[in-house]
Amino acid sequence: MNFLPDAIDRYVVNHSQEAPALLQQLEKETWQRVLSPRMLCGAYQGRILAMISKMSRPRRILEIGTYTGYSALCLAEGLPEDGQLITIDINEERHHFVQQFFDKSPYKDQLTPMVGNALDLIPTLNDTWDLVFIDADKTNYVNYFKLIIDKMNPGGIILSDNVLWSGKVVEKPDPEDVDTNTLVTYNELLRSDKRIETLVLPVRDGLTISRVK
């Protein structure tokens, strides 16, 4: 979903940094080999994630929702040499695909993909986080936030993807549309929670940056 006119969107993309070759290959193979390739965050949003990570230099990153590993590789670009990124996805079938690209990455020793239900796995991680990227099933966004907020380091960043949900968040929601209703609740939670400062960016399908006070 793009909220900019096509000509402006093309100009923005053409005047932004290109993705590294490995990510270009990953994007190509995702479209060729994986179901629902539109779930990929894509080159422009990936450069935004990489820039945020490089500017904040997080030592511990948690990603909830790996898909094919594109966003994890973008976020890893900001890790210091002793930094680590853990990414969780419930889909076991994509794990080998993800690992192949992680193994080709210069950050391969800093990346830990985990397969399973994030609601079960996150409580087992005895870590505090400098950066968390939430990009999994929308119905659990509120639950993911509640699991990680007390484990965020001061000044830590929470990134939340798809928060505009193709514009549905400003429409009258269908009571049976669980994803949209959850995102409306989640966006209000981020706006009102006094522990964080929040800014919504109309990037692609909506990206929220929340900074822990």
Image: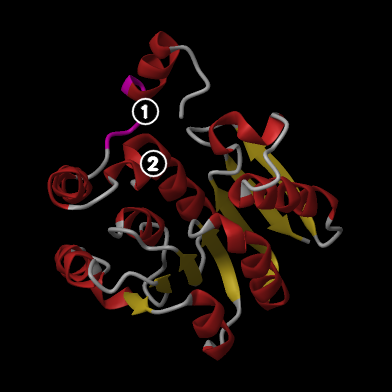
Q: Is residue 141 shown above or below 168? A: below
Residue 180, position as x, y percentages in the image: 63, 44
**Most frequent secondary structure within the magenta stretch:** loop
**For numbered disc 1, what is the local secondary structure?**
loop
Q: Which residue is mark 1?
A: 16
**Mark 2, other Cα within 10 Å: few <14 / some 14–19 / many ≥20:** many
Q: Is residue 171 magenta?
A: no
**Residue 71 percent across, percent down from the top left:** 37, 54
Give the image location of residue 51, x and y in percent.
45, 45
Image location (x, y in percent) of residue 178: 62, 52
- Residue type at mark 1: give it: Ser
Q: Is residue 189 left or right of residue 36?
A: right
- Which disc is residue 47 wearing? 2
What residue lies at 60% left-to-right and 30% top-to-bottom?
167
Locate residue 123 relative to residue 213 in the image: left or right: left
Q: In which quarter of the view is residue 110 placed?
A: bottom left
> What's the magenta region?
14-18
The answer to whether the residues at label 1 and label 2 have Cβ atoms under 8 Å apart is yes
Q: Is the residue marked by circle 1 packed among few (<14), some (14-19), or many (20+) residues within 10 Å?
A: few
In which quadrant of the rendered view does residue 212 lie? bottom right
Query: Residue 16 in magenta?
Result: yes
- Picture residue at 33% right of the left edge, 33% below the top: 17
